[in-house]
C-alpha cells in the first residue's frame, strides 16, 4: 500500500486521509452497480501542491486499464460530489493512480521462493 499523506505536513496527511475516505464513500454510494468500479479499492492518498492536489492510489481486482479509464472518466463528477461532502473552502484536485504494491510484493515473494 502507498503511504498516505505528505511527510512534511500533518495537515496534508489529514486532508489526504479525509479525501480518501470521502472518495471511497462516493464510489460505494454512487458507483456500486458499475461492474468496472465494483472491484476498485482505494489503498492510499498523498497531498501535493500546498494541499491543492491529492493523488488517490487504487487497486483493481479486475482489469486495471479499464478501471483507470473509468476512474478518469468520472473524476470530475467525483470531485463535484467531494466538494459537497467536504467542510472546506477549497476542494483539492484529485487524480487516480494505480497502486502496484501487491503485484511487486508477489514478484518479490516468487523470486525469494526460487532462490
Image (tube, rainbow, N blue to C red):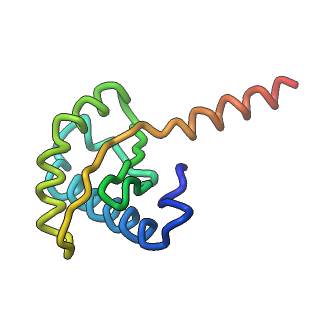
Which residue is found at the position 37% from the left and 48% from the top?
Answer: 55
Which residue is found at the position 16% from the left and 41% from the top?
Answer: 74
Which residue is found at the position 33% from the left and 42% from the top?
Answer: 96
Residue 59, quarter of picture: top left
Q: How many marks?
A: 0
- Asked whether 69 or 36 is in front, the reply is 69
Furthest residue to the bottom?
87
Q: Position of residue 99 (x, y in %)?
A: 48, 40
108 vs 3: above or below: above
Residue 15, quarter of picture: bottom left
31 vs 69: above or below: below
Q: Position of residue 64 (x, y in %)?
A: 37, 29
Seen in the image, is 60 located left or right of residue 28? right
Residue 113, quarter of picture: top right
Q: Position of residue 17 (x, y in %)?
A: 40, 65
Work out which quarter of the rendered image holds the C terminus and state it. Answer: top right
- Asked whether 63 or 65 is in front, the reply is 65
109 vs 21: above or below: above
Q: Position of residue 51 (x, y in %)?
A: 35, 61
Amino acid at each position: 500500500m502507498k503511504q498516505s499523506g505528505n511527510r512534511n505536513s500533518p495537515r496534508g496527511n489529514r486532508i489526504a486521509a479525509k479525501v480518501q475516505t470521502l472518495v471511497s464513500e462516493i464510489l460505494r454510494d454512487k458507483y456500486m452497480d458499475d461492474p468496472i468500479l465494483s472491484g476498485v479499492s482505494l489503498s492510499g492518498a498523498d497531498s501535493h501542491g500546498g494541499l491543492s492536489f491529492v493523488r488517490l492510489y487504487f487497486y483493481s481486482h479486475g482489469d486495471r486499464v479499464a478501471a483507470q479509464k473509468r476512474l478518469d472518466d468520472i473524476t470530475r463528477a467525483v470531485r463535484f460530489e467531494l466538494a459537497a461532502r467536504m467542510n472546506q473552502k477549497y476542494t483539492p484536485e484529485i487524480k487516480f493512480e494505480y497502486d502496484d504494491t501487491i503485484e511487486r510484493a508477489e514478484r518479490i515473494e516468487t523470486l525469494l521462493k526460487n532462490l
